[in-house]
Amino acid sequence: MGFEMKQEKDVLGLIPSKTQGKACSSNSSSVNSPHNKNKKKKKDNKKKVVMTWRRKKTDSRAEEITAVRQLLLTCKEVFSKGGPGVVPSEDKIQQLRGVLEDVGLTPTMPFFRPIPGPSDGSSPRITYLPLHECEQFSIAIFCLPPSGAIPLHNHPGMTVFSKLLFGTMHIKSYDWVVDAPLRDPKTRLAKLKMDSTLTAPCNTSILYPEDGGNMHRFTAKTACAVLDVLGPPYCNAEGRHCTYFLEFPLDKFSLEEDDVLRGQVEKEGRAWLQERDDNPEDHNVVGALYGGPKVED
């Protein structure tokens, strides 16, 4: 989801990752790249992650790695000719949907312990685990403790796959109302796409550059893990910023005589979405290294 994460020296005994949401790099990134000059400390900390990771029962280490490796290889194929606004073909979408599965997380891991935010009423801390990022796509996992929330945000020019691995989560999403006039330069009319609570196992949610719920918000009802694939990923240098929104009811800015509400314009399920100038106060995401099965050799 390309968030600008809060950095901490220690995240529940894990090694913090590099800040996300910065200008994209032309080189592929790997969670196995060095982040700490103290190699011994890095090795010890990483060991803590690996020791708590649930291993699938397999006959060999090669088989154990297959699911995550297959996800990476499939993403490379699906997004090989992608770019901003480019939607993969339906057969490619179904191909990728079919390999999004459990990657070894369990609700008992430290990621999912409720750690309150810095102020009363803010979201508990959410952990972001990057698996892979390149120019064409990114793969990551969001670990949400109970009541953890990811504020309403957009995905400009992207096709996004979100797989709820376990837990119960409420999702609310919007698409822009096409050809609707702007209330002001930062406020647009949107139509509700989804307002539902999902419990794993469930179908993968897919959103597209122009529809499918391009703006969405996640709220964890229980401990949850979400596997996210973005094609292409956020990139400030190319104008793909992660923008957050405030949500207002239709009558907040509108009068009955407004052109927006006149004629055949449907009122039900409409709302105003207004860009937020700063990162939301309830945005509480920190990064850590993914310590599960290897993504790359």
Image (tube, rainbow, N blue to C red):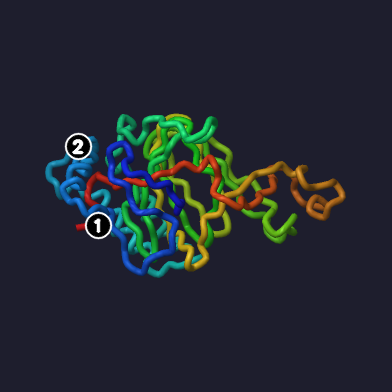
Structural crowding at the residue carrying mark 2, measured as other residues with C-alpha within 10 Å and reported as few (<14), some (14–19) or many (≥20): few
Residue 25 rendering spot, x and y as whole percentages? 37, 66
Residue 51 is labelled as: 2
The secondary structure type at the circle numbered 2 is: helix
- Along the line of sight, the residue nearer the viewer: 76 or 52: 52
Residue 212 appears in the rendering: no
Q: Is residue 141 above or below residue 237?
A: above
Q: Is residue 189 left or right of residue 110?
A: right
Q: Is residue 92 left or right of residue 10?
A: right
Q: Residue at x 32, y 47 (%)?
A: 16
The first of marks 2 and 1 along the sequence is 1
The secondary structure type at the circle numbered 1 is: loop
Q: Residue at x 85, y 46 (%)?
A: 256
Distance between mark 2 and mark 1 Cα atoms: 20 Å
Quarter of the image where one finds residue 223: top left
Residue sticking out furthest to the left: 60
Residue 80 appears in the rendering: yes
Residue type at the position of mark 1: Ser
Residue type at the position of mark 2: Met
Q: Residue at x 38, y 42 (%)?
A: 127
Position of the C terminus, as image quadrant, is bottom left
Residue 100 rendering spot, x and y as whole percentages? 35, 48
Structural crowding at the residue carrying mark 1, measured as other residues with C-alpha within 10 Å and reported as few (<14), some (14–19) or many (≥20): few
Q: Residue at x 28, y 53 (%)?
A: 31
Residue 33 is labelled as: 1
Quarter of the image where one finds residue 194: top right
